Amino acid sequence: MTQTSDKAPYLRLGVNIDHVATIRNARGGGHPDPVRAANLAAEAGADGITAHLREDRRHISDDDITRLMSEISQPLNLEMAVTEEMLEIGLKHLPNACCLVPEKRQEVTTEGGLNAAAKGNHLPGFIRQLKNEGIRVSLFIDPDEHQIEASAAVGADIVELHTGAYCEAALLRDDASIAHEIDRMAQCVQTAASLGLEVHAGHGLTFDTVEAVAAMPEVVELNIGHFLIGEAIFDGLQSTIGHMRTLMDKARAQANDRASA
C-alpha cells in the first residue's frame, strides 16, 4: 500500500512461528509443522513470516528454513546471530530479510537489543555481504537513539525496536513506566525514520499492548510470535492472528484520523 501525504503507511504483521517448532521438538517427530503454521498465518492476514534459526537449534531447524523458503508465499524474515555460520546460511537461502539479533545460549528468549555501537564490531562487513545478495538487513535493537544512529552508520536498512521493556511495564501495570517507554519509543521511531531507516517493532506484544505501538505512524511492521502461538492453543491460530490484525488496523486508522483532524 502506498503512503499518502496525510496518512501513515499500511502496518504489516510478521508472524514468528518459532514456538510451533518448540512444541514439535518437545516430543520429536514432525507435528505440529511450523511450515503449515506459516501458511495458515498468511491466510489469516500475516504479511510475512519470521523464524529465528538459533545456534543451538532449540526450535527452528535448518530443514525448516529450507522448507519455508520453498513452501510459503509470504516473504521470510530470518532472525540470526552475527556469526560466520549464520552468514553462510543466510547467503545460501537468500531470504527477503535477515534480522541480526544478540544471542546467548543460556537465555530463554532474546533478552535485549544488539549493540550496534560496539567498538571494533564487524557489523559493516557482515551487513554488506548480505545486502550485496539483495537481502534486506534489520538490526534488533533497544529503543535508544545512540543505537539507532549506529545502526544507520553500519549500513542497516531497518531497525526493529525491542518492545520488551514497554510490555514488561504493562504486565506490572506500572503506569509511569508505561508512559515513559511509549514516549521513548515514539522519539526513537521518529529519529530512525529521519535517518532513512525502515522501522519495525516487536517482542512481548499482546492484544493489550499492541495498540500504542501500532499507532506510531513511522512503524511499518510488527513482528509477533510467542503470544500468538500461545493464544492459538485456546482460540486457534487463524482467529488469534485475525484479531491481532484487527487491533493493529484499528489503531492505525485512529492515528490517521487524529493526524487529519
Image (tube, rainbow, N blue to C red):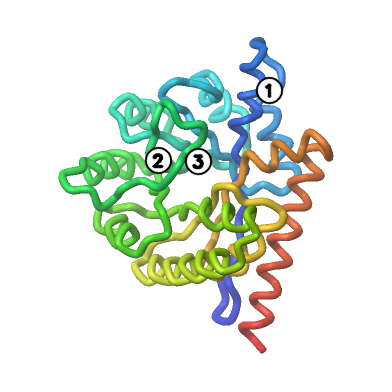
Side (left or right) of 30 relative to 4: right
> Which circle's residue, 2 or 3, is located before the other in the chain?
3
Query: Dividing the image into 4 quarters, which one contains the N terminus?
Result: bottom right
The extreme left residue here reads: 120
Residue at 42% of width from left, 48% of height from top? Answer: 140
Would you place residue 198 above or below residue 20 in this image? below
In terms of secondary structure, where does tag 1 sit?
Answer: loop
Inter-mark Cα distance, 2 to 3: 12 Å
Residue at 38% of width from left, 70% of height from top? Answer: 191
Inter-mark Cα distance, 1 to 2: 24 Å
Would you place residue 68 above or below residue 232 in this image? above
| Residue type, numbered disc 1 | Asp
Pinpoint residue 96: horizontal percent, then vertical percent: 47, 42
User: Which mark is drawn over residue 101?
Assistant: 2
> Which circle's residue, 1 or 2, is located before the other in the chain?
1
Tell me if I can see residue 138 in this picture: no
Contact (Cβ within 8 Å) of mark 1 with mark 2:
no
| Residue type, numbered disc 2 | Val
Q: How crowded is mark 2: few (under 14 residues within 10 Å), some or many (20 or more)?
A: many
Side (left or right) of 149 relative to 140: left
| Residue type, numbered disc 3 | Asn
In terms of secondary structure, where does tag 2 sit?
Answer: loop
Contact (Cβ within 8 Å) of mark 2 with mark 3:
no
Q: Residues within 10 Å of mark 1 (few under 14, many from 20)?
A: some
User: Which mark is drawn over residue 33?
Assistant: 1
Tell me if I can see residue 128 in this picture: yes
Would you place residue 87 above or below residue 214 in this image? above
Inter-mark Cα distance, 3 to 1: 18 Å
Pinpoint residue 126: horizontal percent, then vertical percent: 26, 39
> Which circle's residue, 3 or 1, is located before the other in the chain?
1
User: Which mark is drawn over residue 77?
Assistant: 3
